[in-house]
Image (cartoon, rainbow, N blue to C red):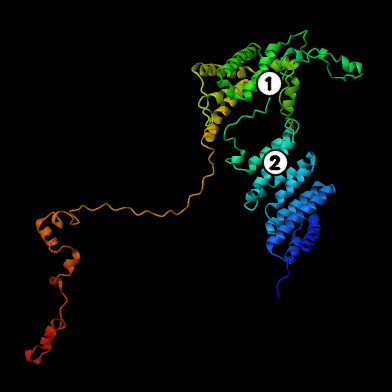
Amino acid sequence: MSPPLFSLPEARSKLTSATREAVPSKNIKHLLSVFSQVPGSENEKKLTLDQVFRVVLEEEIINHASCETCLAIISLAISGVTEGLCTATTPFVLLGDVLDCLPLDLCDKIFTFVEKNVGTWKSNTFYSAGKNYLLRMCNDLLRRLSKSQNTVFCGRIQLFLARLFPLSEKSGLNLQSQFNLENVTVFNVNEQESTLGQKQTEDREDGMEIEEGEMGDDEAPNNNSSIPIDYNLYRKFWSLQDFFRNPVQCYDKGSWKVFLKFSEEVLQVFKSYKLDDTQASRKKIEELKSGGEHVYFAKFLTSEKLMDLQLSDSNFRRHILVQYLILFQYLKGQVKFKSSNYVLLEEQSAWIEETTKLVHQLLCEAPSAGDKFSKMVEHILSTEENWNAWKNEGCPSYVKERQPDSKPLKMARKRPAPEDFLGKGPNKKILMGNEELTRLWNLCPDNIEACKSETREFMPSLEQFFEEAMEQADPENMVEDEYK
């Protein structure tokens, strides 16, 4: 009797019911039992269960189920892969479906589950099948997130990818040393675009009130009445960000002159505008002492009204000075994919060396352990040279393959014997160092012939061997018994 044929509708119905029953308890035993009872080949049943998982998950998402229910289905799929019920890519497909359909606040909870199971994803069962799915899923999430508003979430995704993939993974390496040219700093180019001095007359005419603690433009600190804002310095200062964004411009003669001029003016301002410990904000010091866990990093604002405050901020100054050091390291360093035309002149190299010393001096003069900060930055940049060398070598893997324990022993080659000793000399005569020994040794051409010589026949015949005994046994010889 032939086995029953596989029926897709019947198998899908049974597996769907079993999956729904297994979700609340996260127990796969019942699903395993139903899977074994469904007729058909293993491949057919696996593909059917893959489809069933996606259908059940889709229904839960449409019904606005909780994240715990969605995660229970994914956990069930992970157990199914371990038991051989579904393909290894199923959990990753389900994760992608969930993250594509849920809002970002719920995606945070789903991604927490992904982070906790990083050990599972790195196992032999899942890694090869799911690494591309996880990479695509994380990239899709990063595209949805805002770098300024979802900084922590973006950082968690990057850390997860760093834990998941090895250091030499090509997808995470900038092999050609390309720059992020999309990081554009926007600022007011001319004074007409400035918002400084614009009164809030329109807002006040509309009845808008300023809450306590807010300041209008006329109440802003460091107003025109105290320190006038130098728009020329403002434009030059923020124009330097374009050189930090794309350092290749410094190899152009015209751009280098602009960079040189702007840098000298900005660094001169830093040098003349000293910072004292009393200028540090007491509020910031208290925040540092409190040790708050939430730290937020964002691009600095480029408003002209904040220029004077920013010049008085030691952290702001450190950011700019460290940017100089990073730029100088790139200009002086050896980069594999850097064009052969990108070479510094002697005067450019000399200016960079001199300015580097000035930057470290300014870092040391800053309050709040400026000398320690300067040494730390110098140490980090020195270790960065090892990273650059590794990138130039094509990012080889740091994981060394284990050598086999037992290596086949190579037989030592014997030293060839001299020709005269082997009889390969003149007349094939072996010289023994003594005339008599040489004569005796060369009586025969080789040892085999010498052994076959008739003179070496020492085996006596039967008559010769028993000749003496026969003589003693002959009565005619009259040999007494004691002499036999």
Q: Earlier in the sequence, mark 2 or mark 1?
A: 2
Is 121 located above or below residue 12 in the figure?
A: above
Residue bearing the label numbered 1: 316
Which dot marks residue 138?
A: 2
Which dot marks residue 20?
A: none
Q: Residue 469 lies in what quarter of the image?
A: bottom left
**Amino acid type of the residue that numbered disc 1 sits on in the rendered structure:** Phe
Of 93 and 166, nearer the camera is 93
At 33% from the left and 53% from the top, the residue drawn is 412
**Amino acid type of the residue that numbered disc 2 sits on in the rendered structure:** Cys
Graded by Cα atoms within 10 Å as few (under 14), some (14 to 19) or many (20 or more), the crowding at tag 2 reads many
Of 297 and 147, nearer the camera is 147
Q: Position of residue 174 (x, y in %)?
A: 59, 35
Is 65 located above or below residue 365 in the figure?
A: below
Q: Residue 258 lies in what quarter of the image?
A: top right
Of 481 and 63, nearer the camera is 63
Q: Assign the C terminus to one quadrant of the image.
A: bottom left
Q: Assign the N terminus to one quadrant of the image.
A: bottom right
Q: For numbered disc 2, what is the local secondary structure? A: helix
User: Could one spot residue 234 in this view of the protein?
Assistant: yes
At 88% from the left and 16% from the top, the residue drawn is 202
Q: For numbered disc 1, what is the local secondary structure? A: helix
- Are the residues tagged 2 and 1 within 8 Å (C-beta)? no
Q: Nearer the viewer, mark 2 or mark 1?
A: 2
Whether residue 112 sits left or right of residue 168 in the image: it is right
Q: Position of residue 423 (x, y in %)?
A: 17, 57
Instruction: Specify the farthest residue to the left.
Output: 477
Using the numbered discs, state the Cα–Cα distance from disc 2 to disc 1 in whole angstroms.
32 Å
Q: Position of residue 420 (x, y in %)?
A: 17, 53
Q: Position of residue 130 (x, y in %)?
A: 66, 48
